[in-house]
Image (tube, rainbow, N blue to C red):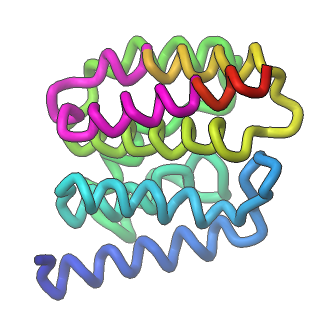
Amino acid sequence: MLEKNDMDLVRSARAFARAKHAGQFRKGEAREPYEAHLAEVAGLVVGFGGAAEVVAAAWLHDTVEDCDVSAAEIALRFGPVVAQIVAEVTDDKDLDRTLRKRMQVDNAPKKSPGGALVKICDKISNIRAVADSPAEDWTLDRQREYLRWSADVVAGLPAAADVARPAFDAELARAAEAVAARD
């Protein structure tokens, strides 16, 4: 059970993320508010026993990458532990997409326990989206490639992600079946 300070941290992160991602939608056919992805990732982190700082980072994991938020602002508002986890899972959008994807695979083994848990929960959420509501402009080949690449990223994560690996593997198999059924 989270203590009051821990609950305050998570609530604050949730409110901040919701405000920053307001008006954003997932790429899938369902056009879900982006907040649904953040809630799913944070819920998975909670379910897998993540500490308050990791849950807060799950809510915030895309704010630096996708919103007008700096890493320094995350550190100031939510502390260095949360900021470090967010930094670990943030892609540098100034880099080419292919390089960013390669860096996720290469950097996976270097994740902290909190970073590893947020990363695998993010991948679970994203492969669920491929299964249930893929981006309208993604071909079947791109969907399959995303699933392969996600598996490569997760395969490199340290042991801290092991608690979530069975769930990832199950969702990956379900997504692969969904994509195959569209073929």
Main structural element of the magenta stretch: helix, strand or loop?
helix
Q: Give the quarter of the image for residue 118.
A: top left
Is 93 magenta? The answer is: no
Looking at the image, which residue sits at the far bottom?
4
Residue 120: percent from left, percent from top: 37, 37
In this view, the residue in front, 93 or 6, is 6
Which quadrant does the C terminus fall into?
Answer: top right
Compared to residue 153, the image places residue 132 above or below, namely: below
Q: Is residue 99 left or right of residue 174?
A: right
The count of marks equals 0
**Above or below, comparing residue 133 to residue 56 in the picture:** above
15 sits to left or right of 121: right
In the rendered view, does 124 fall on the left or right side of 134? left
Q: Is residue 160 above or below residue 143?
A: below
Q: Which residues are magenta?
A: 152-176
Residue 117 sits in which quadrant?
Answer: top left
The percent position of residue 27, horizontal first and vertical second, equals: 77, 46
| 154 in magenta | yes
Residue at the extreme right of the image, as rendered? 137
Residue at left offset 27%, top offset 33%:
166
Q: Residue drawn 64% across and 14% down?
A: 145
Q: Residue at x 27, y 30 (%)?
A: 111
**Residue at screen point 26% across, 59% down:** 47
